[in-house]
Image (cartoon, rainbow, N blue to C red):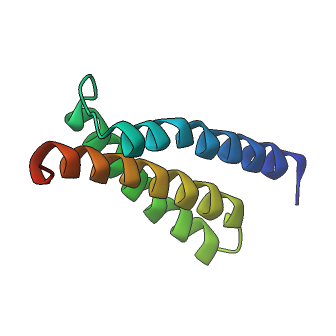
Amino acid sequence: MTLTEILYLIGGIILTFAALPQITQLYMTKNTEGLNLLTFLMITTGYILKMFYAIYTAINGYGIVLIITTSLGFLNILTVTFLIIYYRYFSE
């Protein structure tokens, strides 16, 4: 693994953990006020497109770090998006 891949992996891990306080707060308070659903839908879409690129690079023999970090970030953003939709439109 090259230094660039290590730095990318560390950055991806930091970004993954950065979303955890938001997920925890949403889950505990069930309050989505102040969160823009469109923003999180756009970020989710961006991660989906980024995943296609990550898969493409992995198929060509490199890019496993990109798949790992993109997958982790995607799962976190998808969780936030799901919680916003759920608490706004489906919870009591």
Numbered disc total: 0
Which image quarter holds the N terminus? bottom right
**In this image, 72 relative to 92: left or right?**
right
The x, y position of residue 77, in whole percent, is 42, 48
Residue ID at (77%, 45%) = 10
The x, y position of residue 73, in whole percent, is 53, 51
Residue ID at (35%, 36%) = 29
Q: Nearer the viewer, residue 23 or 14?
A: 23
The x, y position of residue 36, in whole percent, is 24, 29
Residue ID at (52%, 40%) = 19
Q: Is residue 17 visible?
A: yes
Residue ID at (28%, 34%) = 31
Please tell me whether residue 91 is drawn above or below residue 57 in the rendered image: above
Q: Nearer the viewer, residue 37 or 66?
A: 37
**In this image, 70 relative to 88: left or right?**
right
Give the quadrant of residue 69. Answer: bottom right
Please tell me whether residue 47 is drawn above or below residue 31 in the rendered image: below
**In this image, 57 relative to 90: left or right?**
right
